[in-house]
Amino acid sequence: MAGKFFDEWQIGDRIEHPIRRTVTETDNLLFSTMTHNPQPLHLDAEAARASEFGQILVNSTFTFSLLVGLSVGETTLGTLVANLGFTDVVTPRPVFIGDTLRAVSEVKELRASKSRPEAGIVTFVHEAINQRGEVVCRCERSALLLRRPS
């Protein structure tokens, strides 16, 4: 598991990340309380049962964070200078306790850095997919990556 240098990417490269993660009640509870999110849908089983979902809903910010974390190993681990931004974050379907997520990444854009000749910018589209094959989170990430040392 190691990220690639800027020069090693091509537009359209696609990675099915090997690590999958089952979301636990502890994940959701700790993340929600650590970020001071008091939403009853995340923390109150009775309130969640009475909602349209009928069960606790996993905090979507946790889902987004997990997606990014699952993608790091094969994309930017050890080659990242900085994450420049995340855009177009969507969570089209809910995540529930016990769902198992996997991540897929695709290179959307490549460009040389104007300010850092030793680096370039890769724009990834990351998707989190549950065990039913449904996309539960998608985002674009612009990453400043080192070029391969000469």
Image (tube, grey):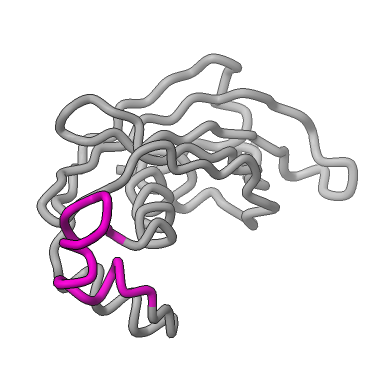
Question: Is 102 contained in the magenta span?
Answer: no
Residue drawn at 34 percent across, 76 percent down: 32
Question: Can you say which quadrant of the picture contains the C terminus?
Answer: top right
Q: Indicate whether 50 appears above or below 5.
A: below
**In x, y percent, where is residue 34?**
37, 84
The quadrant holding residue 129 is: top left
The quadrant holding residue 56 is: bottom left
Residue drawn at 23 percent across, 70 percent down: 47
**In x, y percent, where is residue 125?**
53, 31
Residue 146 visible in the shown view: no
Residue drawn at 27 percent across, 50 percent down: 52
Name the residue nearer the viewer: 88 or 142: 88
**In x, y percent, where is residue 101?**
23, 42
Name the residue nearer the viewer: 128 or 96: 96
Residue drawn at 25 percent across, 37 percent down: 102
The magenta-colored residue range is 39-58
Question: Is 56 contained in the magenta span?
Answer: yes
Q: Indicate whether 24 appears above or below 102.
A: below
The quadrant holding residue 17 is: top left
Name the residue nearer the viewer: 74 or 61: 61
Say left or right for 77 vs 134: right
Name the residue nearer the viewer: 146 or 107: 107
